Amino acid sequence: QVQLVESGGGLVQAGDSLRLSCAASGRAFSSYTMGWFRQTPGKEREFVAASSQIGGSTTYADSVKGRFTISRDNARSTAYLQMNSLKPEDTAVYYCAAVVAYLGDVTNLKAYNYWGQGTQVTVSS
């Protein structure tokens, strides 16, 4: 069983930055593919970014490419999402997710079997 706890959300202005953290339990964090997703009311949860356990490769949604950076600290069992140049359309609840030893499509939310509780990010214009 893996438990994920997000932190770092908040209210910011357009153009500001935020860093989200996702602390994971378990001893094999380096074997987890970590993903970040977001959801707004009435919409489906959407992929934002992922960090694969294989070589630490990263994948981003087109909407955040060049502005967001996913990283991980395996020693601290923590994943991060650095969000720069935030826009009002980035407003959402952000969730981190994990899947162990996964080789498939990291953008597919159904692949992840562990989820955090979510943290609200609100960007005002």
Image (tube, helix red, strand yellow):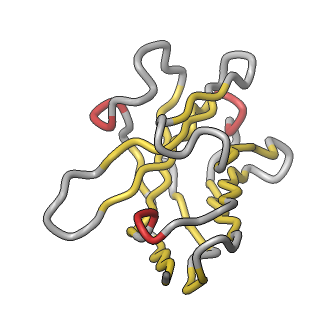
Residue 61's x, y, as percent? 47, 36
Front residue of this view, candidates 17 and 22: 17
Q: Mark yes or no: residue 97 visible.
A: yes
Specify whether 113 is left or right of 90: left
Identify the residue at image location x=54%, y=21%: 101
Give the image location of residue 15, x and y in percent: 65, 70
Question: Which of the 4 image quadrants contains residue 109?
Answer: top left
| Residue 117 seen in the figure | no
**34 or 63, which is in the foreground?**
63
Q: Quadrant of residue 58?
A: top right
Q: Where is 87 relative to 49, above or below?
A: below
The tally of labels here is 0
Q: In this view, does 52 lie to the left or right of 2?
A: right
Q: Residue at x 74, y 17 (%)?
A: 55
**Up-down relation of residue 39 to residue 69 (above or below):** below
Q: Which residue lies furthest to the left in this view?
A: 42
Determine whether 11 is above or below 56 in the image: below
Q: Which residue is drawn at 65% across and 59% down?
A: 83
Give the residue furthest to the right. Answer: 75
Task: In the rendered view, tell whether residue 96 sits above or below residue 94.
Answer: above
